[in-house]
Image (cartoon, rainbow, N blue to C red):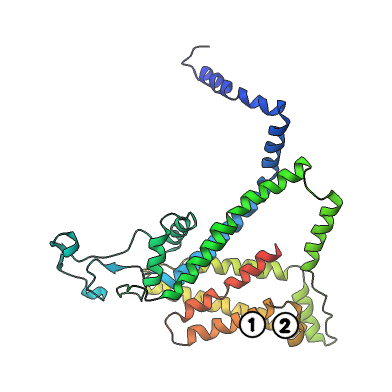
Amino acid sequence: VSGGSGVGRTLRVGRILRPLRMINRNEGMKVIINALLRSLPAVAYTVVLLLLFFLIFGILGLNLFAGRFFSCNDGSIMRQQDCVGVFVNAAAGGVLMPRVWANPPYSFDNIGAAFKTLLEVVALKGWVPVLNSVMDVTDIGLQPQRNASPGNVVFLVLFIFLGSFYMMRLFVGIIVAHFRQFSGTALLTDTQQQWVTMRRVMRHVRPIVSGSALRWRRFFYDLVMSRWFEPLVTCIILLHLVALSLQHTGQTREWTEALDAVHWVFTTIYIVELTARILALGPIGYVKNDLPWSAYDLVAVVGMVVGPLSGFRRGTGVARALRFGRVVKLLTRL
C-alpha cells in the first residue's frame, strides 16, 4: 500500500491504537475504563443538571444586573446622557480622550453573556472584577459607584459555593462511586446498598391524602392525583424558565410587552394549579402534604401577582425569580 494513499494513512492510524490492547491485559485498567463507561449516563444527567443550574443563576443575573455594568471612562460623570465629548485622562498622562459609555468584557445583558460570565466565575479565574462590578451597580443609565450595592455579593458567593465547590465535584463523585461499585471495593453489599437506596426513596414518599366525599372536590382530587398532572406542571415550569431567559438588554418595547404578557399567562396557570391543589386537598391538607414547598408555592404565586403591581422597577424581576424555587423542588425529586 502506498504511503500517500488514504488506505495507508488509515492503517497508520490503526497502529496508533495498538497500545489500547494493554487494557485487556491489565485488570486495573479494565476496571477503570469499565467504570468510566458505566458512569457516562450518570455524567450526562449531571451535565443536564449543571446546565439547569447555570440557567437559574443566569436568569437571576439578568434580572439583577442586566444593563447595570455599563460605565463611563470619565469617573466624574454620573449619568449616561452626560457621557459625551472629551476629557483629560490624568491617569494616562493628561491625554485628551473621548468619553465612552461602555460595558466591561463580562455582563449579564443576555443569557449568552450571563453563561460566559458565570463560566469565568465558576473557574475561579477573573472572578474578582465581576465581584467588584456586582457590588458597584446602581441602576440602568447611572455610573457605578464603589460598594453601592454590597448585598449583591450574596449572589456571587452563593454561585461560587454551589457551582465551584459542589456542582463541579459531582463528576468526580459519580466516577468514584461507579468505580467502587464495579470493582467490588464498596463497603456495602448489594443488599445493603438496595436498602440504603430504598430509604432515600422513602424519604420523599408522602402519605396519600384521601379525597373528599363531595363530588366537586373529588373531581379536583382526581385531577391533582392523576399521573399526568405533575409531568404537565414540570413542563410548564421548564417552559417558563425558557421564556425568562429570552430577556436581554436593549430589547424593544414590543419584546418587553410580550415577555410581560407571557409572565401573566404563566402566573394565571400557576394560580389555577394552586387553586386546584387547595380545592383537592383542602387548605390544611395542602399545606401539610408537602411542607415546606407547599408554603413556598403559595408565597411565590402571591409574589408573582403583587410584584409587578407594586410599582417597583424590579418588581417583575423579583416575582419571576420566585419561580426558581420550583425548579429546585423538581431537582430534589428527580
Secondary structure at numbered mark 1: helix
Q: Quadrant of residue 247?
A: bottom left
Query: Given the image, on which type of amino acid does mark 2 rest?
Result: Val
Residue drawn at x 42%, y 81% is: 313
Is 179 drawn above or below residue 325 in the view shown? above
Query: Given the image, on which type of amino acid does mark 1 rest?
Result: Leu
Q: Position of residue 200 (x, y in %)?
A: 78, 62
Q: Is residue 75 visible?
A: yes
Residue drawn at x 78%, y 47% is: 186
Q: Position of residue 311 (x, y in %)?
A: 44, 87
Tag 1 residue = 298
Q: Quadrant of residue 92?
A: bottom left
Name the foreground residue: 166 vs 306: 166
Residue drawn at x 56%, y 76% is: 322
Q: Is residue 143 left or right of residue 233?
A: left
Q: Quadrant of the C terminus?
A: bottom right
Name the foreground residue: 198 vs 111: 198
Tag 2 residue = 287
Is 271 drawn above or below residue 19 in the view shown? below
Q: Position of residue 30 (x, y in %)?
A: 71, 33
